[in-house]
Amino acid sequence: MSEFHRLLIEQLNIEPWRIPVVVLSGIGAYCGFLLLVKLFGVRVLAKMTAFDAVVIVMYGAVAGRVIIGHPPTLAAGIVGLLTLMLIEAVFGEVRKIAGVRRAFDSRPQVVFVHGKIIEEQLRKTHLSKSDVRLAIRRASIPSFEQVQCIILEPTGDLSVFREGQPIDPNLLRGVAGVDLLYP
């Protein structure tokens, strides 16, 4: 066998003992990422600044390196990706169970009401005042006083409601802090 063929096989192959290591590393990285998102809030995943994007790319690089291990091979990469895809599929099915969904998904949160930022909610949700101002500008609302409320959604998006427009109570079901809307 030529040196080229030996190197090619070495780069494409994976030793059988490494397969469970890659799978367990993938599961660990996935669970670690879920924990970090839970600790730091969904805001880290939505409407990213350049700094946020750098952090996410760095996380991906670190996680990829941890999952694939040394030496990185195509087979290890495929096993790692397959593991992550399977975990995501299983987790997607498990999340359909109400108790599990509540444990992992954050509730929508009122962060701004009747022209005023709710400072405590900003701290809890890891939002900044500039995030709130950006959401108001994107909604083409020219002043704080014209905002009835802003809700941080579980996706990290901000929903903005104008003052003077009635909000269907069904839209507010399950929203934390909704009582602040009705003094």
Image (cartoon, rainbow, N blue to C red):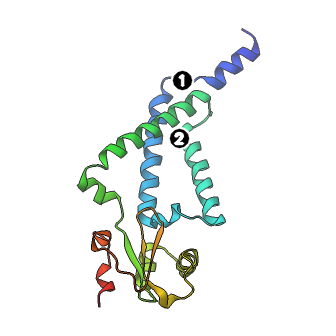
Q: In this image, 56 relative to 29: left or right?
A: right
x and y percent of residue 62 in the render?
59, 49
Query: Secondary structure beneath disc 1?
Result: loop
Q: Amino acid at mark 2?
A: Ile
Relative to 168, say whether 35 is above or below: above
Q: Which residue is mark 2?
A: 67
Residue wearing tag 1: 15
Distance from disc 2 to disc 1, alpha carbons, whole Å, reads: 15 Å
Going by the numbered disc 1, the residue's amino acid type is Glu
41, 165: nearer the viewer: 165
Q: Earlier in the sequence, mark 2 or mark 1?
A: 1
The answer to which quarter of the image holds residue 15 is top right
**Residue lying at 29% horizontally and 87% vertically, measured from the top left:** 182
Considering the numbered disc 2 on the image, is that residue within a helix, a strand or a loop? Answer: helix
Q: Position of residue 166 (x, y in %)?
A: 35, 80
In the picture, which quadrant includes the N terminus?
A: top right
